[in-house]
Image (tube, coloured by chain):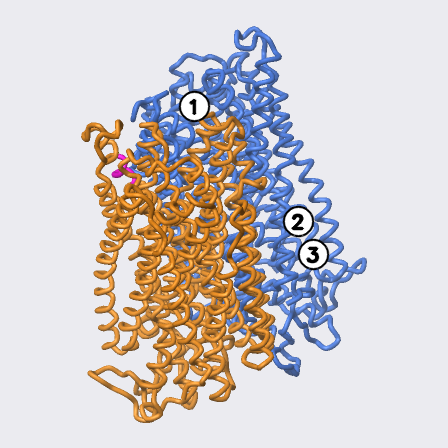
Chain colours: A blue, B orange
């Protein structure tokens, strides 16, 4: 029987979805402006829809192949038969969140421009509430998906009767017979966890494809339009300008939404799985620790909605007022969540240690955001220093930017290290190791508990950016463009902190998933041992045996390990996941390499796609007469198509790499190799992603700082150097960097889902 | 009693030193050319000497401080009292090798120019034999240092009598009483290992300081001379041109020599320490496994000398003949070494498994070199692709170069992974784990066994480069400059493979050191437990007890571990060095970050030092009248001084960071944190270093490829973009990338030396 508190989870998710709908309807009531504005918005909307349709077609194909493969593995008894379905729902919901967020954004940007033509505050409200739609859709569907599966598995599949007799159907084993309560809960949570693989796969395609799309369009529009033809940004004469605006929606809105949907679900489910594996708990206690992360998330949703309503400002608001009111929203939510969790701790729903872990996670999110802000905002020394190097030319600008990016890694790394160690120590420490690891999971849940509102501030950016584009293309009066620029700048600030938040939460989530992986491995060892005649499962030189079996005889070099060894700590040491196992080291090296090779591939993909866009824009300027004189319209749709095709083609290889490598490493180097791969990918990938994000962000703002009139201003030597830096930074910060978040998580998810295969068939 | 085969070791080292002296004398017999040539050579020589003197002054200060600190630790009984002295000898010999190599190079370059004015072959012979001086000095002094210490500790300190009664002096414990033969050998080898810290410290200052010096001079000479004043490279009117030539000597010769001296000694000693720790060996067998790496190195020295004599070519040699004859030398040495080792294996001095590990190491070195060649030579697609991007401007050139650098990491990473796993499997595998790890050490020893000749091909590069500079400044006829250019190009090829070799050997050496670290930790646990009243040593929640003691009572969360647990595998798992210990993960994150932050610091240092040089060159052009008309001479010495001061100031902070961080991590996060730090630094640092080296090398050659007339040739748009790429690549490939080699090794060395402190005082 489910604990009645469980119902808080679906209720909170439905409330989130209701408010998402409500905010969407509210936004739609606003006027979309004059006919030109409507037309431009329609172009962008159609382009974005066309792109997403074609992306989802490719993704659907990949999903079909993967579902078949997972099905085959299920028949080989090395895969849970629910996984193909879970995989599909995860992918579906993740894609749906991206789609809905993007749809809202494309409806909102014209309305934001129209709103801004009335007042700054009106523009802010429309853009922010529209961003909130995506925030709430992500958390709403995330938690709904979790609640549905949890109810279904608990009440329909793992019934007391099935646990005694087992459940077989069509040659597939859904429930093993003679399952204990504890085994049941572990089975349920790790099964659910695997729907994260669907979400990650979807998210990776969205991030990589969207990232390639947006930068190909951006570079194409800039190189030919701004540099060669000398027309301003977002000029309607530029054929790639619509594609550029579409790109903001598909990359920054849909990609970000799918990415964080996955972090959100992954952190909650990994923590639940770690809770299920906690030793020495009664049935009620176990149900409580499994549900605790869901309940915390549900509380977070409700209070995030509260925070959204806190974001309001005076009609005559200044830039600073705007930022303050956004901070009031996120800060207010965080504070209310802390109070609510203190109440939960007081009621013994979570321990005070876990409360500490959540606080650590929330704080870590804030610090990483602030650090990102410091290293990328033109108000501080690092970005100003890059701008100053522009005086000496592009080469020194590039070197300085890379150096700033590399140096900036220390803030998030130290924060994450303190976050890991702190949340571990608060929750249990070495004295209660499993509880400590459970606490690390809660740090991720804590960081993401405010996602409903932080994602709103994030999605706000591209909406404001597009509103600016719309205002420019519709030739609205300059004061409107000034207002949308102010909103855009606010969006840049929130986007920088949002990116830090995304990578920080990805790191903590991956940590929790890594720990959950070992539980999945243990589960499979047990399943396969039970299914074997001898009651053992041999992996390389390890012979794993069930608790009540006699210890098997081992030969030289072999080792017998009891599967149900007390906790994660004993088990992982007995299984030699230490850094002195050459397989672990091999994995570490490959993991670090993956981060670099993957970044290289996405970077080159942008270059190739952008090259095609450059050719197309040049062709249109040449072949369509009268574009420059505004006598005829450029063929916007063709540019969208070029970017779409480019993104479609280029996203396949890096994405497949992320799926294939963990499987291959697992088969060759076994579980120790996989653990090494994941740890290497996590640490090197995290650091590299921060470097790429921050270097890119700093170059962007250094250029803007020069454009404000510093070091010679527009068209000076420094400005030319700044433009080079900005162009180099584009794929850094909008394609490779953000995609690394998902690479890290997807490799972990694939490993979790493929644990059965690794355990059964690894070579070493 | 030492095994008589031991004497092969000092004899081989003396033969190497004899041939170094012989080649030096031979080289000195050649004419140094006309008076201008002599004067220029003198300027460069004096500049280089002045730089080294001032560098050694700074290093001496750092050494005094560190020796005092190590002495204090020895009095606190957490440091071996030999360490301060061993530290000094390591630093001294490493510095001496750098000094002698550089001295030879500065004498050789003028003579090479003069030789090239007779024939290409004459130039090659002088340059290559001079390079061989450094190769032989490094291996000769390396092995001599090892032989002296091994003899001294075996015959003078750890005498049978001292082993019974102990040896105390001035409040310091040199030998504990009641030492077994096995404990003695472990004590001896790990004590010797610590002289590697002196060598690494010296090497780091040489690489970082030299790297900053050379690039500051290079950038200064290029930016003002070539770009602003429009005079050719190496023009005597450029005040920074002498400093530029000095830079090649101090960075590429002295820095490289000190670096590889350290890898060479580190790999031999770490492997010896792993041999000493092998379980279940008799005294004779143990002596044999400890001496085996030294003997293999000695054999390698002798056959490298043979290989050097193989390098000869016809008088009318073409470029291709030259490369073939160099390959004949290195390939011939490798082949002879394999034959000799097969004989050793046949005589049971090493197992056939170890023979396999050595083969793996040798092969890995070749593959990494070839991979580097592929990704950086203008004969292959990657570099040509970068040059082609020049058509679209500097931004795409930079992106493509970074992408190529990142992608190129896969070859060395996969090679190192196969090298680790292969040498492990050949030597013992999981069935004989300790032997397998010993085999990984032997892969490093194998890769470095040809160092005598590979370093010769490496040092050859800067000598040829300087010869070209000399020819240009002395205004020798164009055909001479053509010949020196041919030698220079050959040097670029060998330098690229040499850099791959340096980083590859650093990775394998660091691997072996990592394993030796755990033996050092065990040694200190034993020492401190013996010294305590209860016979235990508590570290965090672990209570380590001596073998014959009763198992101590533990509280909740604590764990009792027997210090002498069978092998490295059991010990490292029992001590929880698994990736699930949050302390290990914290270390991993910090290690990855260190690689990025350190690179950032060295990159910025170059920028600052180069800025000063630019100012100085501009000042001289303005204030010294008649420079451009060749009426008066620029003030070369002042530029050398500027670069020297810049390097001196800037090398301190990153170097100290590399020394301080492992100590701080050890004290806060304990042994698991240190192991994580080293593994993270190794994997992320290795990958990043390869990326920086290869991106830099590829940009350099892409620029040269354009200069050959491709994509528009000199002064085209593509060429300007290529110059930007080359300038960005300079600090990548000559400062940050190569310095990372030593960062990785130095952090490991510091950890080994500070193991006692970590074990006694860590917080977690």
- For residue B50, side relative to residue A515 (left or right): left
Q: Nearer the viewer, mark 3 or mark 2?
A: 2
* Front residue of this view, candidates A197 and B60: B60
Q: Nearer the viewer, mark 1 or mark 3?
A: 1
Q: Which residue is mark 3?
A: A156
For label 3, the SS is helix
- For residue B749, side relative to residue B441 (left or right): left
Q: Is B514 above or below relative to B402?
A: below
Q: Which residue is mark 2?
A: A87
Q: Count residues near mark 3 (Cα–Cα under 10 Å), then give few for <14, some for 14-19, many for 20+.
A: few
> Which residue ends up furthest to the right in the rendered image?
A170
- Which disc number belongs to residue A123? 1
Does any portion of residue A20 appear in the rendered image? yes
Cα–Cα span, label 3 and label 2: 19 Å
The chain letter under disc 3 is A
**Magenta segment, which residues?**
B610-614
Residue placed at 62% from the left, 81% from the top?
A: A556
């Amino acid at each position: 029987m489910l604990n009645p508190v469980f119902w808080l989870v679906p209720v909170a998710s439905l409330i989130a979805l209701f408010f998402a709908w409500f905010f969407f309807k509210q936004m739609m009531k606003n006027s979309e402006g004059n006919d030109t504005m409507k037309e431009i918005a329609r172009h962008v909307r159609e382009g974005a829809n066309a792109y997403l349709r074609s992306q989802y077609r490719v993704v659907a194909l990949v999903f079909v192949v993967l579902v078949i493969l997972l099905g085959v593995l299920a028949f080989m008894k090395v895969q849970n038969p629910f996984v193909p379905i879970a995989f599909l729902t995860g992918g579906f919901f993740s894609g749906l969140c991206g789609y809905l967020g993007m749809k809202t954004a494309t409806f909102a940007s014209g309305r934001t421009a129209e709103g801004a033509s009335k007042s700054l505050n009106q523009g802010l409200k429309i853009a922010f509430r529209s961003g909130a739609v995506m925030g709430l859709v992500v958390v709403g569907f995330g938690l709904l998906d979790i609640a549905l599966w949890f109810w279904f598995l608990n009440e329909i599949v793992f019934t007391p009767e099935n646990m005694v007799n087992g459940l077989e159907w069509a040659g597939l084993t859904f429930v093993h017979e003679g399952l204990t309560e504890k085994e049941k809960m572990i089975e349920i949570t790790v099964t659910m966890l695997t729907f994260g693989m669907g979400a990650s796969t979807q998210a990776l395609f969205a991030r990589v494809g969207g990232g390639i799309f947006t930068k190909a369009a951006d570079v194409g529009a800039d190189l030919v339009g701004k540099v060669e033809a000398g027309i301003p940004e977002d000029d309607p004469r530029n054929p790639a300008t619509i594609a550029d605006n579409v790109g903001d929606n598909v990359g920054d809105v849909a990609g970000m939404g799918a990415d964080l949907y996955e972090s959100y679900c992954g952190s909650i489910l990994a923590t639940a799985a770690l809770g299920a594996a906690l030793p020495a708990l009664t049935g009620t206690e176990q149900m409580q620790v499994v549900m605790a992360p869901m309940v915390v998330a549900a509380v977070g949703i409700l209070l995030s909605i509260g925070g959204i309503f806190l974001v309001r400002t005076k009609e005559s608001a200044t830039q600073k007022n705007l930022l303050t009111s956004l901070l009031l929203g996120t800060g207010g939510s965080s504070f209310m969540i802390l109070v609510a969790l203190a109440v939960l701790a007081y009621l013994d729903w979570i321990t005070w240690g876990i409360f500490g872990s959540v606080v650590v996670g929330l704080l870590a999110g804030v610090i990483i955001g602030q650090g990102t802000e410091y290293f990328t905002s033109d108000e501080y020394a690092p970005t100003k220093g890059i701008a100053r190097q522009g005086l000496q030319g592009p080469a020194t600008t590039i070197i300085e930017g890379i150096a700033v990016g590399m140096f900036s890694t220390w803030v998030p790394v130290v924060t994450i290290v303190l976050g890991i160690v702190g949340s571990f120590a608060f929750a249990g420490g070495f004295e209660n190791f499993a509880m400590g690891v459970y606490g690390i999971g809660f740090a991720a849940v804590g960081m993401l508990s405010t996602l409903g509102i932080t994602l709103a501030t994030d999605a706000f950016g591209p909406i404001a950016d597009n509103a600016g584009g719309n205002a420019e293309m519709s030739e609205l009066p300059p004061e409107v463009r000034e207002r949308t620029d102010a909103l855009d700048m606010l969006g840049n600030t929130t986007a920088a902190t949002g990116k830090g938040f995304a990578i920080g939460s990805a790191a903590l989530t991956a940590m929790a998933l890594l720990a959950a992986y070992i539980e999945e491995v243990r589960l499979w060892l047990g399943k396969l041992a039970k299914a074997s005649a001898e009651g053992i499962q041999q992996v390389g030189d390890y012979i794993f045996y069930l608790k009540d079996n006699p210890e098997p005889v081992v030969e030289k070099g072999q080792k017998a390990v009891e599967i149900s060894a007390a906790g994660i700590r004993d088990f992982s040491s007995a299984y030699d996941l230490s850094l002195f196992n050459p397989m672990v080291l091999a994995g570490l090296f490959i993991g670090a390499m993956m981060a670099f090779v993957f970044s290289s591939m996405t970077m080159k993909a942008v270059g190739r796609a952008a090259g095609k866009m450059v050719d197309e824009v040049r062709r249109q300027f040449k072949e369509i007469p009268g574009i420059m004189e505004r006598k005829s319209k450029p063929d916007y749709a063709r540019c969208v198509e070029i970017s779409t095709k480019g993104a479609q083609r280029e996203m396949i290889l890096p994405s497949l790499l992320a799926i294939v490598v963990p499987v291959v490493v697992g088969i060759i180097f076994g579980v120790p190799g996989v653990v090494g791969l994941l740890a290497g990918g996590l640490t090197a990938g995290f650091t590299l992603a921060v470097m790429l994000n921050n270097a890119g962000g700093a170059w962007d703002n250094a250029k803007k700082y020069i454009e404000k009139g510093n070091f010679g201003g527009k068209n000076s030597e420094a400005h030319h150097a700044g433009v080079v830096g900005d162009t180099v930074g584009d794929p850094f910060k909008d394609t490779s960097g953000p995609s690394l978040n998902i690479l890290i998580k997807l490799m972990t998810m694939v490993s979790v889902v493929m644990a059965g295969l690794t355990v059964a068939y690894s070579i070493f």
